[in-house]
Structures are given as structure tokens and as C-alpha cells.
């Protein structure tokens, strides 16, 4: 569908954390599917943040020589870190060269520390709050005011609250994006698939179009700036 534009995927995991693919294969598969851009955002905490970001930024610098059809961005997903450490680690990731910072939100299916969502949207350093679970109105308002995008996800378990996240976002003006939280080859989706996910979360066709086409481009522009 031409009106949907090319897919931009912000949330994937490689062999550098718990994914099945090398970063280069994630990029190649995304390119083969016609993606405009893909970010590898491996799970990090204070133990592995520096090594992961260094490896991904080195790869990004190397890829600039070859200029493929799909742009590659190095990033991180801060995962199960203490809420008070989110801002500190996010700032460190950016200093090391991460273009995108995701915070692992309070999904229903993992024991994420309460207060993680709020710390992420208040930090001023997080771009996307992933699978935020039963996110509160206050947290959504903070996300809206601080330019943090909230994630609708295709990942099993994490997607259970997509409808709730969409509803809260519509009521507070928070921006949404659809991501896969990709770990394996079968997790890749098309832009049409992403659109269906947005509709399935209860969005109107107009709002779903904004979420899968316009919002990713706004966020991508911010990363480039």
C-alpha cells in the first residue's frame, strides 16, 4: 500500500543480547523486505552497555561506506535496570554513540520494577517506552510532554495491553509507534502488518496511519538531527 510508506523498525535484538541473528543479517533481511530503516536495540544494563554500543556503532560506521537501501541505527534497550539508573545509563549510551534509547517498560509478563515507566518518561533521555503494560494516565502525560513514544508491539505476551496503551495514548496525546521487539527471522513484519496491529489496538484508520507512517518518520528525523 503506497499510502503506508516504507517500514521503519525501531526495536530489534541481535546475537549481542538474546536475538538469533547477527546485526548484519537483521539489516539484510530488512533491506530485502524494503524497509526504510532499522535499529538494533539490544538488551543492556550497566554490565554490557559499553561493549554492545561500541560494537553496534562500529558496525554503523562501517556500513556508511556502502550506503545500502535501508538505513541502520545502533541503539539499546535498557532492561530490568533500577528506575533511578535509567537516566544515567541512557545518557551514557548516547555519549558512546547510541542513536536510539528504548526503555523496557512494565509489561504484564515480566517482573519489571514498579516505577520503571515513570522514570523512563521523566528522564529526558529515552526515545521509546517499550511495551509499557498498564501505563497510567500520569505516565502517558509525561511521555507526551517529553516526546517519549509509546510502543504497540507484536511480541507475544507484551502485546496483551496494546488496546489499553492505545486508549491511554489517545486520551493524553502521547505518540505511538508499532514495533516488533524482533528476536528471530519470523518476527519480521510488513508495513501492512503493522497497520493491522494498530487497527487491532482499537485505533481508527486515520490514527493507525499516523502511528505506522507519520510517527516513525518524526522520530527518525529526531534521530538524524
Image (cartoon, rainbow, N blue to C red):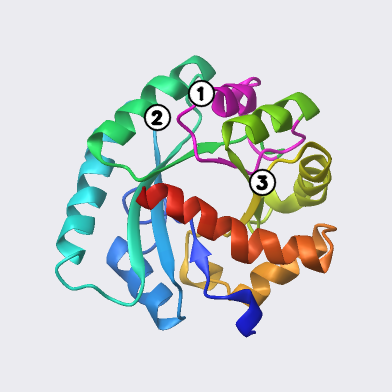
How crowded pointer 2 is (Cα within 10 Å; few <14, some 14-19, many 20+) is rated as many
Numbered tag placed on residue 123 in the rendering: 1
Can you identify the residue that label 3 sits on? 175
User: In the image, which is nearer the foreground, mark 2 or mark 3?
Assistant: 3
Real-space Cα distance between discs 1 and 3? 17 Å
Q: Are marks 1 and 3 in contact (CB under 8 Å)?
A: no
**Circle count:** 3
Quarter assignment of residue 101: top left
How crowded pointer 1 is (Cα within 10 Å; few <14, some 14-19, many 20+) is rated as many
- Dominant SS type (magenta): loop
Q: What residue is drawn where x is 67% and y is 38%?
A: 132
Q: Is residue 63 left or right of residue 87?
A: left
Q: Is residue 126 magenta?
A: yes
Chain-order first, disc 1 or disc 3: 1
Q: What residue is drawn where x is 49% and y is 26%?
A: 124
Disc 3 is placed on an element classified as loop
Rendered location of residue 141, percent (x, y): 72, 29
State whether residue 123 appears in this view.
yes
Rendered location of residue 169, percent (x, y): 76, 42
How crowded pointer 3 is (Cα within 10 Å; few <14, some 14-19, many 20+) is rated as many
Can you identify the residue that label 2 sits on? 90
Disc 1 is placed on an element classified as loop
Q: Are marks 1 and 2 in contact (CB under 8 Å)?
A: yes
Q: Is residue 149 above or below residue 62?
A: above
Amino acid at each position: 500500500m503506497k499510502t503506508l510508506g516504507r517500514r521503519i523498525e525501531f526495536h530489534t535484538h541481535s546475537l549481542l543480547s538474546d536475538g538469533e541473528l547477527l546485526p548484519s543479517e537483521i539489516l539484510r533481511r530488512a533491506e530485502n523486505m524494503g524497509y526504510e530503516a532499522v535499529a538494533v536495540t539490544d538488551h543492556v544494563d550497566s554490565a554490557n552497555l559499553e561493549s554492545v554500543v561500541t560494537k553496534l556503532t562500529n558496525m554503523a560506521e562501517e556500513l556508511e561506506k556502502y550506503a545500502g537501501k535501508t538505513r541502520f541505527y545502533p541503539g539499546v534497550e535498557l532492561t530490568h535496570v533500577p528506575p533511578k539508573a535509567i537516566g544515567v545509563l541512557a545518557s551514557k549510551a548516547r555519549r558512546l554513540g547510541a542513536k536510539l534509547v528504548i526503555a523496557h517498560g512494565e509489561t504484564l509478563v515480566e517482573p519489571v520494577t514498579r516505577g520503571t515507566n515513570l522514570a523512563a518518561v521523566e528522564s529526558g533521555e529515552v526515545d521509546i517506552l517499550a511495551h509499557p503494560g498498564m501505563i497510567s494516565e500520569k505516565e502517558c502525560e509525561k511521555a507526551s510532554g517529553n516526546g517519549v513514544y509509546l510502543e504497540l508491539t507484536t511480541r507475544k505476551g507484551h502485546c496483551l495491553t496494546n488496546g489499553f496503551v492505545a486508549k491511554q495514548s489517545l486520551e493524553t496525546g502521547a505518540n505511538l509507534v508499532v514495533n516488533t521487539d524482533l528476536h528471530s527471522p519470523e518476527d519480521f513484519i510488513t508495513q501492512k502488518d503493522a497497520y493491522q496491529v494498530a487497527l487491532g489496538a482499537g485505533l481508527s484508520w486515520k490514527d493507525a496511519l499516523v502511528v505506522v507512517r507519520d510517527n516513525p518518520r518524526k522520530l527518525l528525523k529526531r534521530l538524524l538531527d
